Image (cartoon, rainbow, N blue to C red):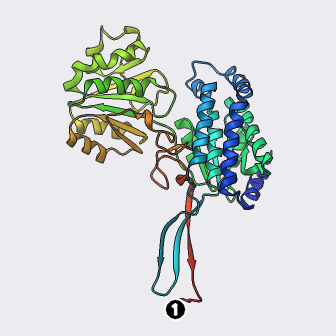
């Protein structure tokens, strides 16, 4: 199949006069309203996808829509509508001695392509954020979520049509793998490509795309409980970071514990055992837990249990003797997504914050907060784990670039 027409139609939509800010916000509010009104339809289509997936698959939870999740998605869209648009924001402005007036102004990235797996909420999020920032979105969802994504895009297109706006502001490509290849090679049509999904997907897109890529998604997340950490805080934080929702990229994968606090490990692990978390503990931690933590859930850790994004009710435990060892373990195993320390020592805290290389670094709180909505961004198009252009939750500003506007009165440059 020739996919070129999808990209050409997107470019045409982008060349049209952009909707006014007021109309953009009205469309977003109407999409949020339509999502609520058509909840039964969305759940019906989502069930078709769920029926094809094994409930034990880590992607099953991410694929699942519920009435409550649809309400939350609609609320995020409404939040985006309520935020100020970054478009046209003057980042710097100066007048040179020769009279040239120079401004640096925020503008859309252009055409944003997103390749994602079984995450139907991404369809809503990408549209809302791109539309608010004047970007055209081209989405390539996985076959696992085809019915859900198609239903969502149908609702979006109905709202766009009702406002006489070109529906090609948002395009959902067919599910065939060939569409992915076409998007990876859409040079001249797509300005930036954002993969959202497993590390394998991200690696594949990065290694094969001819279009610039912003890496997002994979989270191998650590929390270090140091020798001064507050036990009550640790119990609540570790439980929340691990079990609140295990299939998300900010979920805890590895608890690092200072050897002086091994006596507290049983207390930290107790709620995890009650909830059925499988623990892969290194030798020192295993000796503490053996015979007390549920035997069916406890194994001695192997090398492959560290540096792993579990996306399930599994957790590894690493024992260290000091902060330097904790930082070393993080450095060699982290995906640079979210890392945390539980400590009451200000010097350790500052050292951790300054030395950990991650998009989001936490002190005495759960990594579950790495989320665009939680950060006040309305929603997110992904969580960037790289350093160029954007890092961490990508909201409205991260979907813009800038241009230099230079105004003169006849000046010419002379040697």
Residue 62 seen in this snapshot: yes
Image quarter where the N terminus lies is: top right
Residue 185 seen in this snapshot: no
Q: Say whether residue 284 is left or right of residue 249.
A: left
Q: Position of residue 158 (x, y in %)?
A: 78, 41
Q: Residue at x 75, y 27 (%)?
A: 41
Q: Position of residue 177 (x, y in %)?
A: 70, 39
Quadrant of residue 57 within the rendered picture? top right
Q: Nearer the viewer, residue 172 or 407?
A: 407
Which residue is disc 1 drawn over? Answer: 414
Q: Residue at x 28, y 16 (%)?
A: 266
Q: How many marks?
A: 1
Q: Position of residue 294 (x, y in %)?
A: 37, 9
Q: Residues within 10 Å of mark 1 (few under 14, many from 20)?
A: few
Q: Secondary structure at mark 1?
A: loop
Q: Nearer the viewer, residue 156 or 7?
A: 156
Q: Nearer the viewer, residue 410 or 360?
A: 410
- Check the image and report above or below for 338 versus 301: below
Quadrant of residue 261 within the rendered picture? top left
Q: Position of residue 355 (x, y in %)?
A: 29, 46
Q: Residue at x 25, y 34 (%)?
A: 343
Furthest-bottom residue in view?
A: 414
Q: Say whether residue 237 is left or right of residue 93.
A: left
Q: Residue at x 29, y 17 (%)?
A: 267
């Amino acid at each position: 199949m020739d996919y070129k027409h999808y990209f050409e139609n997107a470019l045409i939509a982008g060349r049209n006069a952009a909707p006014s800010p007021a109309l953009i916000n009205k469309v977003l509010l109407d999409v949020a309203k339509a999502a609520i009104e058509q909840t039964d339809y969305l759940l019906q289509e989502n069930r078709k996808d769920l029926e094809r997936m094994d409930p034990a698959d880590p992607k099953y939870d991410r694929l699942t829509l519920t009435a409550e999740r649809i309400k939350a998605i609609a609320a995020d869209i409404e939040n985006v509508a309520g935020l100020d648009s970054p478009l046209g924001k003057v980042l710097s402005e100066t007048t040179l001695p020769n009279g040239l007036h120079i401004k640096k102004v925020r503008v859309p990235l252009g055409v944003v392509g997103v390749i994602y797996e079984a995450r139907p909420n991404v369809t809503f999020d990408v549209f809302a954020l791109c539309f608010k920032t004047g970007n055209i979105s081209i989405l390539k969802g996985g076959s696992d979520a085809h019915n859900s994504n198609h239903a969502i895009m149908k609702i979006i297109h109905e709202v766009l049509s009702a406002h006489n706006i070109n529906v090609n502001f948002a395009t959902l490509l067919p599910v065939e793998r060939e569409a992915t290849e076409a998007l990876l090679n859409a040079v001249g049509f797509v300005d930036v490509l954002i993969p959202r999904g497993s590390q394998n997907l991200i690696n594949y897109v990065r290694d094969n795309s001819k279009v610039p890529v912003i890496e997002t998604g994979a989270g191998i997340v650590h929390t270090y409980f140091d020798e001064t950490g507050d036990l009550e805080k640790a119990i609540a934080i570790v439980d929340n970071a691990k079990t609140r929702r295990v299939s998300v990229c900010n979920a805890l994968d590895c608890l690092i514990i200072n050897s002086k606090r091994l006596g507290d490990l049983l207390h930290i692990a107790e709620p995890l055992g009650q909830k059925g978390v499988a623990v892969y503990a290194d030798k020192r931690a295993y000796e503490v837990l053996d015979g007390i933590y549920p035997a069916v859930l406890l194994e001695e850790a192997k090398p492959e249990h560290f540096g792993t994004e579990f996306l399930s009710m599994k957790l590894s435990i690493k024992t260290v003797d000091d902060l330097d060892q904790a930082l070393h373990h993080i450095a060699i195993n982290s995906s640079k997504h979210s890392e945390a320390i539980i400590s009451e020592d200000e010097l350790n805290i500052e050292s951790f914050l300054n030395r950990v290389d991650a998009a989001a670094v936490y002190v005495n709180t759960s990594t579950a907060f790495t989320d665009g909505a939680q950060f006040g961004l309305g929603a997110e198009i992904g969580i960037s784990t790289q350093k160029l252009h954007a890092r961490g939750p990508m909201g409205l500003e991260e979907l813009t670039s800038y241009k230099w506007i230079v105004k003169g009165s006849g000046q010419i440059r002379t040697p």
